[in-house]
Image (cartoon, grey):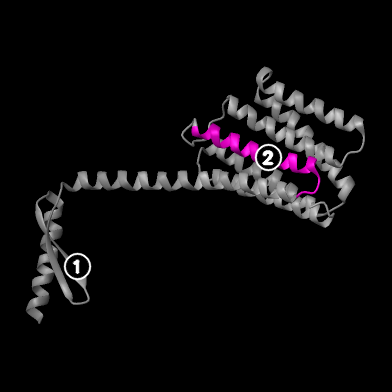
Amino acid sequence: MMAGRLTAITAISRSLDLLKDGAHFTQCFLLPGGIHCTEALSVNHGFYSQQLGFQIFFSHRKNMLFLLLAVHLQAVLVALVIASRCKLPILSAGFICFALASLFEIIDHTQTDWIYVNRISLSNGLFYGALAAGLALLTAAVSVSRLWRATLLLLTLMTELAYALAGKGVTIALQSVLLVLFLRQWWYHFRDPYLWWYSLFGICLVTAFGTLLSISGDQFWHLFIGPCGSVSLLLLLWVLQRAKLA
């Protein structure tokens, strides 16, 4: 019995030594019935490590791409589900715009190999335009004044034109104005404390993760932006449900 164990240990030791230089070697595995050894072909240790590194890299990249696609698709689906629950067509249209914004973002990412790039493009412009339209429609849904609605329409058009004529910075500034008007009107209409939670997830956390992504370039932060946005939309749905509008 002892001799058998020594033979197995010797075979394992020999296989590890030969693996360093490259040769035929014996692979030994500890199985329920004992230690079993098979002959296998070893490659150069350095090349093997390099090949294994590439395999791990591509596996990690494939997993990251899958996760990025998943978090973006869920943003589209969540917005569409909320749109289907709304009782007012103008509210449904607003959430559909948010779904379109996420879809345009997916299209934009496919053009950059799913790596975040701060750039000007048609799909990126449509992304900002859809966001602006969504905010304007949700704000108009709780605004009775025609002047308010005309102002929202004008701001939306200015936001979409600014992207092509003045750049992304002006577009984001105008979109921020729409966001402030949206929060003002919804708070005035609903007085619901869940709007503060919307501000936390939809504004603070999305901005924080977006800033970390822009500064570091690490796609890890990209994974949190979509889910935070979806949580903020679900909070709006909760507000609408409490007001019997969904």
Task: Give the residue displayed 36% in from the left and 44% down from the top.
Answer: 58
Q: Is the magenta stretch mostly helix, strand or loop?
A: helix
The residue where tag 1 is placed is 29
* Quarter holding residue 32: bottom left
Is residue 32 positioned above or below 244 on the image? below
Task: Give the residue displayed 72% in from the left and 46% down from the top.
Answer: 83
Distance (Cα) linking label 1 and label 2: 55 Å
Task: Give the residue displayed 76% in from the left and 37% down from the top.
Answer: 135
Magenta residue check for 46? no
Return the x and y of residue 220 as percentages of the image width and height: 51, 46
* Quarter holding residue 101: top right
Question: 168 or 13: nearer the eye?
Answer: 168
Magenta residue check for 102? yes
The residue where tag 2 is placed is 98
* Quadrant showing the N terminus: bottom left
Q: What element carries label 1?
A: strand
Q: Which amino acid does label 1 sit on?
A: Phe
Is residue 54 positioned above or below 126 on the image? below
